[in-house]
Image (cartoon, grey):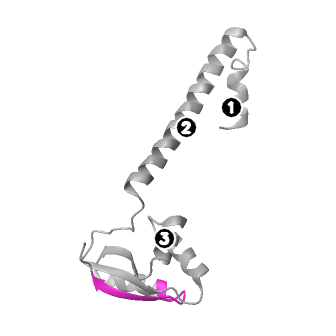
Amino acid sequence: MNNWFFRFLTSGFGTGTAAGKAVGWTIAICLIGLWIFIWLVKIIYKAIVGEKVPHYKDGNYCVELVAIGNNPKALKKQLCEFKGYSSSLAKKVMNSVPSIVVTGLDKEAAEDFQTVIDATGATTEVKIYQPK
């Protein structure tokens, strides 16, 4: 929470009165509680659902990572630039080679993804996606 905003709330909205301070502290505590609740929901959601590789609905192709290559930092950085990738998901995909990087692409988009990933020194293959 922003420091100036918290000070404003706890000072009684700038009035310094006891009633204003009580209302300000109540609002501050509720906001902190809401922030903690949202944080916990995110943690529980990630634990239940887990992170999944991005699935585009344009086609039936996927890009599979076959080998990491000699520059894993560049590969991780490139994966994190894709929409839907977090640092932990990129690490998970890289640690479980061979693994699928993206799914649900048309042939041209899959080849574009392959070109971008292969530029980091990794080895990939474009395949027809068949969910397990």
> Dot 3: what SS?
helix
> Dot 1: what SS?
helix
Q: Position of residue 95 (x, y in %)?
A: 50, 76
Query: Residue under circle 2?
Result: 36
User: Could you tell me the amino acid type at mark 2?
Assistant: Ile
Q: Position of residue 68 (x, y in %)?
A: 51, 85
The one nearer the camera, 112 or 124, is 124
Q: Nearer the viewer, mark 3 or mark 2?
A: 3
Quadrant, the C terminus? bottom left
Query: Residue under circle 1?
Result: 5
The one nearer the camera, 39 or 105, is 39
Within-10-Å neighbours for mark 3: few <14, some 14–19, many 20+: some
Q: Is residue 28 left or right of residue 119?
A: right
Q: Is residue 48 left or right of residue 59?
A: right
Image: magenta residue range: 117-128
CA distance for labels 1 and 2: 18 Å
CA distance for labels 3 and 2: 27 Å
Instruction: Report the residue at 32% width, 69% height from top.
Output: 56
CA distance for labels 1 and 3: 39 Å
Query: Residue under circle 3?
Result: 92
> Dot 2: what SS?
helix
